[in-house]
Image: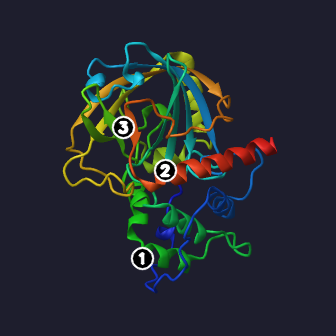
Amino acid sequence: MFGIRVLIGAFPLVLAGYAAPVAAEVSGRDLVEALNGIFGQHAGQRASHAKGICAAGEFRATEQAPELSRAELFGAEPALVRVRFSMGGGNPVVPDTARAVRGLAARFSLPDGGVTDLIMLSAPVFLARNPEQVFEFLRVREVDPATGLPDPEKVAAFSAANPETTRQAAWLAANPPADSYLSTRFFGVNAFRFINDGDEAVYGRWQIEPADGVVELDEAQLAELGDDFLSEDLVRRLAAGPSAFEVYVQLAGEGDDVTDPTVSWPESRPRVHVGTLNLTSEEGQSCDTLMFNPLALPAGIEPSEDATLRVVRTTAYVESLARRLQRQ
């Protein structure tokens, strides 16, 4: 969701203990205010993943998808889809060349009139394991008005005391960005419970892969691109023809934590190919008023007990939506 690159890499490590108080109950207002403390307030914009572009298409399930879940999403009828690709963070003019996490949010409109939403990131791990840690992660990065930067000692001390919060940045540093939203691999960092008609249940995480493969950029190529190359590329490619993603569910194995989004599961875990997402048109900012809710689920898919899924990605989303609608 928040997709903020950890800033510790830019500063010397400080080993002093981190002594900031932990928020006992973190609200959506707390999280949005913390994001505003980093990126500022931008009228009518999302507090996180502010810069984005929309697309439309359809989803068709595979024949084996119903073996995983009885959800209507996996039925014979295709679902219409609206997708929002985005850059991480709350800066609506962040350059697309930034080494930040990218996002994919999708709304599937089901034949019965219901909806299912997915929230994905271009990294397989989230930046914190629970709502309190998300809040503190953001709070220590609040910008000092005098310097225009967060306090490096606070950031370093927090990271040293909470090493799991550095995993997303480490993954981004080790994996070059793709040359297009349409050639980016996206991961669901939260687990869900999938139940089939036989009441057999398994935990899994969503994964979406470009049908034509991932195309990565090196630093020299990235330096030559413009600030809006991702959105410009999306417009150009979809005007030339459809673009497809294959949709999978990676199944949890023995010992895999289904409640901690900072931990990725081994690549060796089996996956179920559940469908194809075919994008046919670019839609500008037409979906910017939507609140993509990962708890908007059909029968046959249930949320795990992951607190970042149940708290961070509901209360903060509602707060952010209310604020941007008021300011438009």
Residue located beneath label 3 in the image: 207
Residue located beneath label 1 in the image: 160
The structure's colour scheme is rainbow
Q: Which mark is residue 310?
A: 2
In front here: 268 or 99?
A: 268
Q: Residue furthest front?
A: 199
What is the CA distance from the residue labelled 3 to the residue labelled 2?
Answer: 20 Å
What is the CA distance from the residue labelled 2 to the residue labelled 1?
Answer: 27 Å
In the rendered image, is residue 1 in sight?
no
Kindly state the secondary structure of the residue where label 2 is placed: helix
Of label 1 and label 3, which has the lower sequence position? Answer: 1
Q: Hey, what amino acid is under mark 2?
A: Arg
Of label 3 and label 2, which has the lower sequence position? Answer: 3
Which quarter of the rendering shows the C terminus?
top right
Say which residue appears at 46% left-offset and 37% top-offset: 179
Q: Hey, what amino acid is under mark 1?
A: Ala
Q: Percent from the top left, x then y, of residue 216?
A: 40, 41
Q: Hey, what amino acid is under mark 3?
A: Gln
User: Do residues under tags 1 and 3 come within 8 Å of each other at their CB atoms?
Assistant: no
